[in-house]
């Protein structure tokens, strides 16, 4: 790869990165996306680099990189949503809510808004509203079936989980009977969201 990668342009590297990620070759995907960003630091390339960090479990770097993407393109709504998911995965519900604030610029019946409201309802212990909102979001989302599958699987998991009540100065935390095992499952679940790569 080292002998040929230097002749590729940013667009070629971007799509090679997508292919490598879809094939679960994350080492190559990371190289391709980083090279692509180095040649053309556009919002799409930066966002996909952040998504690859998330695939690798590098959540802090994923969040920082996705925030860089939305800094380049404030209306990159998927990046706003995914960066919030990254924070939710590691149990930082307050930071997730902050990352999702920009989504309030969207219509209240848009899928991403309904998804974030549903997840936050679950985090507050309101499973009834959470389930209803996530189902509404799935019905509203007609453009990304892969995300609907992830949200449906996520909802099943959230229905099994319990959330501590928020205390002043504390971060909301997800709790289960086997917390470590469930956090691993949650991580794998959320990372499926990045399998549906944006090709625009």
Image (spheres, grey):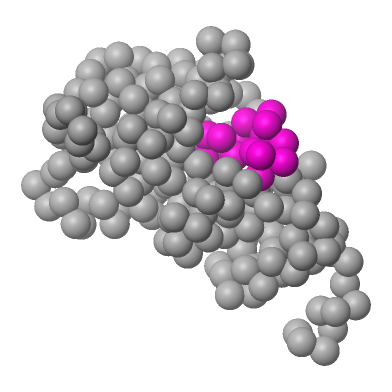
Q: Position of residue 171 (x, y in %)?
A: 24, 37
Q: Nearer the viewer, residue 134 or 166?
A: 166
Q: Specify whether 91 is left or right of 117.
A: left
Residue at image location 32% in from the left, 48% down from the top: 90
Q: Specify whether 178 is left or right of 19.
A: left
- The C terminus is located in which quarter? top right
Residue 76 appears in view: yes
As drawn, the residue found furthest toward the bottom would be 3
What secondary structure do most residues of the magenta stretch adopt?
Answer: helix
Which of the 4 image quadrants contains residue 181?
A: bottom left
Q: Nearer the viewer, residue 100 or 16?
A: 100
Q: Position of residue 189 (x, y in %)?
A: 39, 48
Residue at image location 49% in from the left, 24% down from the top: 101
Residue at image location 21% in from the left, 40% down from the top: 174
Residue 16 appears in view: no
Instruction: Report the number of discs.
Output: 0
Q: Specify whether 181 is left or right of 116.
A: left
Residue 5 is inside the magenta segment: no
As drawn, the residue found furthest toward the front would be 169
**Is 8 rendered above or below residue 126?**
below
Residue 74 is inside the magenta segment: yes
Q: Write down the region rendered in magenta.
A: 69-82
**Is 132 rendered above or below residue 41?**
above
As drawn, the residue found furthest toward the left would be 177
Residue at image location 68% in from the left, 52% down from the top: 46
Q: Position of residue 135 (x, y in %)?
A: 42, 20
- The N terminus is located in which quarter? bottom right
């Amino acid at each position: 790869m080292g002998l040929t990668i230097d002749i590729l342009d940013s667009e070629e590297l971007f799509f090679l990165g997508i292919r490598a990620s879809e094939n679960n070759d994350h080492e190559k995907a990371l190289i391709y996306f980083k090279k692509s960003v180095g040649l053309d630091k556009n919002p799409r390339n930066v966002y996909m680099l952040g998504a690859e960090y998330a695939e690798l479990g590098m959540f802090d770097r994923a969040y920082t990189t996705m925030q860089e993407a939305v800094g380049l393109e404030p209306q990159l709504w998927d990046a706003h949503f995914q960066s919030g998911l990254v924070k939710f995965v590691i149990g930082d519900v307050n930071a997730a809510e902050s990352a999702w604030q920009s989504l309030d610029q969207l219509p209240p019946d848009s899928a991403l808004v309904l998804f974030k409201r549903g997840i936050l309802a679950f985090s507050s212990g309101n499973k009834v509203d959470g389930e209803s909102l996530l189902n509404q979001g799935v019905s509203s989302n007609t453009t990304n079936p892969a995300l609907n599958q992830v949200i449906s699987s996520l909802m099943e998991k959230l229905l099994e989980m319990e959330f501590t009540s928020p205390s002043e100065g504390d971060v909301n935390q997800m709790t289960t009977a086997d917390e470590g095992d469930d956090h691993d499952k949650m991580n794998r679940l959320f990372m499926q969201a990045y399998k549906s790569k944006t090709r625009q």
